Image: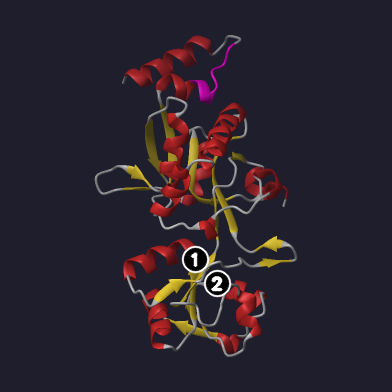
Amino acid sequence: MRTAFVGLMLVSGFSGGAFAETTLEKIKAQGSIRMGFTNEAPFAYATPDGQLTGVVIDVLHQIFDKMGVKEFDGGLTTFGGLIPGLKAKRFDLVTSSIYIKPDRCAQVAFAEPLYILGDGIVVTAGNPKKIHSYADIAKDPTIKLAYTVGGTGITDNAKAMGVKDEQLVAVTDDPGGYAAVQAGRADGFANPATILEGQLKALGDSGLERASPFEQPSENGKPRYGFASFAVRLEDQDLLAEINKHLAELRTRPEFMAIMEKYGFTKDDMIPAGVTTTKICAG
């Protein structure tokens, strides 16, 4: 109640005056921030006891601790409600597995990219076929790649890189993909990398491993994968600058990679050198 009362007094006291409190000033004064999220593991989600957690949440705690903002007030919404909710000032910041895209950049201000949401391939231990890209699969017609029926992104990416239809092995579900590799019916199973990493750990089969390094697909110089981050309102440039400053510093510390690895991310999921939000927004 105290926080709500202070916020009300600040707004009403200066509504007609020369000073308007920025979002950054407000959250520092309150020590809390209202955050929109979509309950999507491992990115940002609520535990059964109501605690907000996930890879992005842990990163944001590191950032906002530096600002003296210790409390996160989570606002659960749909993915489609994130940006409208932010613009309507129901949230101070929104987070999930949000791709930075030019059309979204016109509506909200994205922080620097946090990780890539790319593809991954599980192979048998030792990676006997030396699969490190879809191009490697395309070069060897004997290689078979399993994929889960219904997920078009994986097969679209593989085909764009030259993989032929006859090299693709359809499975009904993700467990079927791992089983196909274990049984030798496929040389690899492709899935979104962060999902694959978690599933591989849960499976606990030492005879399987994630192909690493793995070159993410690109076409005509443009990546066929997403760069994800969190976003604030366009007018909150001081908040954005503060977030980016602390994010840049965090990346230099071992805590950053420890957080990423805790939620199944690896060095293959990190942002390539030279990639910035400005460049992504430019298209």
Residue 247, disc: none
Indicate the amino acid at tag 1: Pro
Indicate the amino acid at tag 2: Ile
| Residue at point 49%, 41% (across, down) | 253
Answer few, some or many: residues within 10 Å of disc 1's Cα (few below 14, many 20 plus, some between 14 and 19). some
| Residue at point 55%, 22% (across, down) | 22
| Left or right, residue 40 beside residue 215 | left
Q: Residue at label 1?
A: 192
Q: Residue at label 2?
A: 154
| Residue 250 falls within the magenta-colored stretch | no
Vertical relation: 114 (above or below) 130: above
- Over which residues does the magenta segment extend? 19-25
**Disc 1 to disc 2: CB gap under 8 Å:** yes
Colour scheme of the rendered structure: secondary structure
Q: Residue 241, located in which quarter of the rendered image? A: top right
Q: Which is more toward the observer, 218 or 210?
A: 210
Q: How far apart are marks 1 and 2 (CA)?
A: 8 Å
Q: Residue 1, located in which quarter of the rendered image? A: top left
| Residue at point 48%, 70% (across, down) | 191
Which percent across, then down, holds residue 107? 63, 41
Vertical relation: 174 (above or below) 265: below
SS for callout 1: strand
